[in-house]
Image: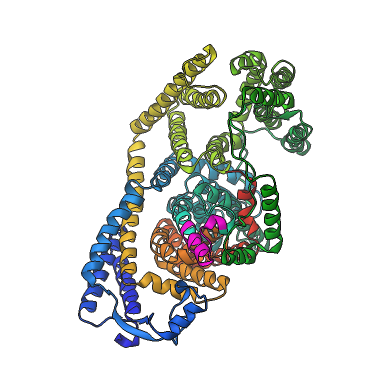
Amino acid sequence: MLFGLDGVEIGLIIVFLCLFGGILSGFPVAFAIGGAGIISFGIIAALDSAGILIHQAIDTSSGMYADLISQGIKSDTISVFRYPDLPRIAEPIFPSGWETAMDRNLSFIVNRMNERVLAGQSIETLLAVLMFVLMGITLERSKIANELLTTMARVFGPLPGGLAVSVVVVGAFLAASTGIVGATVVTMGLLSLPTMLRHGYSPQLATGVIAASGTLGQIIPPSIVIVLLGTLAGDLYSAAQETRAQVAGCSDALTYLGEPAVVSVGTLFQAALLPGIMLAVLYGLYAFGYALLNPSKAPAVEFGDTNSEVIGKNHGLTWFLGVPALLVVGLIGLSNVGLVGSQDVTVDSFSDAGKTASLRTKVSEECAASMLDLHGQSAWDAAVAEQTEIDAAGGVKEARALSDEERTAAFIAKVKDAAPVGSGLAIGFLLLALVLTTARGVSPTSDTRPLLIGGAGILLGLAVDAFLIAPTTTPGMTVLFIAIPLGLTFYGCHYAASLLGKNELLRVVFPPLVLIIAVLGSILGGITNPTPAAALGAGGAIMLAAYRRLQDEERSGAIIIWATFAIIVMILVGVNFDLRVSKSVVEVENWIAFAVAKFTYLFAMFGILYGCWVLFRGKVLTPIVRETAKVTSMVFTILIGSQLLNLVVISFGGEHYIQGFLKSFDNEFTVFLIVMLVLFVLGFVLDFLEIIYIVIPIVGPVIYGGTFDPKWVTIMIAVNLQTSFLTPPFGFALFYLRGVAPKEVTTGHIYRGVIPFVLIQVVGLGILWFFPSIVTILPALIPN
């Protein structure tokens, strides 16, 4: 043994030194990682061939090992860390020779590249990275951050620490828009830091709040960190739980857990939303509290009057809080009494499959004991009772084709039970009503007659739906019935939009806010997966940036606006009409709907292409595409290089060695705490990409193979990486900010400024540790 260390330990040290040497060499990190893997493998192979690296493996032929197996201990849980007295045998770290290991690595890397990069199941999710990067860079170049900072400074500036609070708000907004930490920190540093210093803010507070707010892109959806972690977490959790089930004596994870062992990126977005908002609120509270204790270092600042009307307190409370709350509560109340609800009368051609027990109880004794220990006696007894009832009824009934009489009876029953007002139409009219009430609130002195006409149109539309539109009414006839109410409503909303456009806050915040809601809403609501939502966000960001560009050039943006409406109409038509024109019989209204959808689709594509032309002509599109290609190329190159490095670690048993060390601890919390501390330290010197693709695959089978919720584990890792991004002296966010900070701001100012926010991050991690429901509540409430 060299230096008294095991050969595998020497191999891990060599890989570690080669990796950090490659990173510090000045070569691009994406290539340094792959090069470190090749060089480290060459060094380890040479030492192994010289007989220097010897691995002290457990002697599986010994009597002590056989005794452990006879006691029912699984071979996967036996390691030198848990049983150090077991007999050992000396063997090379490459038992079959380094040539065989290299052949295996080469074939594996080709298969893994095909699986992860070229044609695997995760490639669709990884495409979301490209779209989100394009969306973020486009919004960054469209001056949204500048306008947001100016507007928020006017809103929060008069408060103590108002500028710092506005930076937190804008930082959270940009995090939800871009998801790119470096871009957010640099943008905020360039725009807000000089302003804050000029108005007497402490350099420590100014730099700290900018660096911390910029790292919110790590956690607030659509975070690229969450996307990349999610692609790994799903595979790691599924494989780890299958292994856990087999160790427990069960056939598969579904039997053992009672639910599928899956976790998706969309679910992780849902899980990350509340923790991200929580951290932003903690940042804002600290900035406000700091200003109250140190008013000279965070003074209130007046940025002058806006062009918006002065709104009285009572007026604002009425129209911004009272009336909207009344409308929402009213809709919920009507839904509870059955006046508003689903009008879907579709009858399936087959009967529903019979209900199964909550747990599979017809399992082996070993599996039953493990399931009893996992779920508890009450859950097991309930499942046994359910299975007994099912067996007494003749077993689970399989789905069968319904007869014509049964389908007719089911159809009549659904028509009878349908609510008078459809939920879709009611929600649509509610959103339009909120537009009218908001317009009334922001402009107290304007003429209210158009708003009243719009409100009358909403009431008329609901009445028409209740008395004239039946669940069996075709979509085409429904459109004809509500044409006049919609016309009145749109007349009022058109006037309301003109009033809202005069309000500076709404004019700046509303367009990107709608885009963010459209992207995140479709993901968080379970409507679609992240890739189509990211594509929607990228297209919307191009159109928004083009519209801003046309405004700067004092040209009409009518084409962009009409293209936006075309997208809305296309979606509404696709949801409400049957566009399958290839059927043998197609109704006239569906042909008309197909034509409308086709026209709006073509016009929407024309609007996007026109937006690209506007940006290209303005010399904005070229740097956007170049920067997007640079970032995404780096991501995928790091992915390939890290796979190569992982294979080197696996080839000489390093992965199994590390996992054996972690599994030697009986306390699951202890194992997770060790992993979190290691990730925190590695975050000083490694980017999140390297950590995700190098470290997580090694420790993932352990931390995802226990009883912890995989969503909670993933979000804790993301927040931990965010913390390490802030921690001196190596936090990446600090280097980003140092690169754009004025000369009078020293590195010491930045380091001292971020320390309170690092402590806030630690507090946030503690809150999530003791209250994991903050992570799990949204995925539990929102269907997927």
Residue at the image position 26 percent from the left and 63 percent from the top: 104
Instruction: Name the one closer to the observer, 13 or 549.
Output: 13
State the image coordinates of residue 249 (x, y, percent, origin top left). 53, 65
Q: Which residues are magenta?
A: 238-255
Identify the image quadrant of residue 518.
top right
On screen, residue 759 versus residue 102, left or right, reads right
Q: Is residue 228 above or below residue 470?
A: below
The secondary structure that most of the magenta stretch takes on is helix
Identify the image quadrant of residue 736.
bottom left
Instruction: Name the one closer to the observer, 135 or 264.
Output: 264
Q: Quadrant of the N terminus?
A: bottom left
Identify the image quadrant of residue 598.
top left
Q: Is residue 560 above or below residue 233?
A: above
Instruction: Name the one closer to the observer, 528 or 633.
Output: 528
- Magenta residue check for 266: no
Q: Is residue 13 above or below residue 252?
A: below
State the image coordinates of residue 475 (x, y, percent, origin top left). 60, 18
Residue at the image position 46 percent from the left and 63 percent from the top: 700
Q: Is residue 274 above or below residue 95?
A: above
- Magenta residue check for 240: yes
On screen, residue 124 versus residue 54, left or right, reads right
State the image coordinates of residue 8 (x, y, percent, origin top left). 34, 77
Q: Quadrant of the C terminus?
A: top right
- In this view of the protein, can residue 536 be seen by the observer? yes
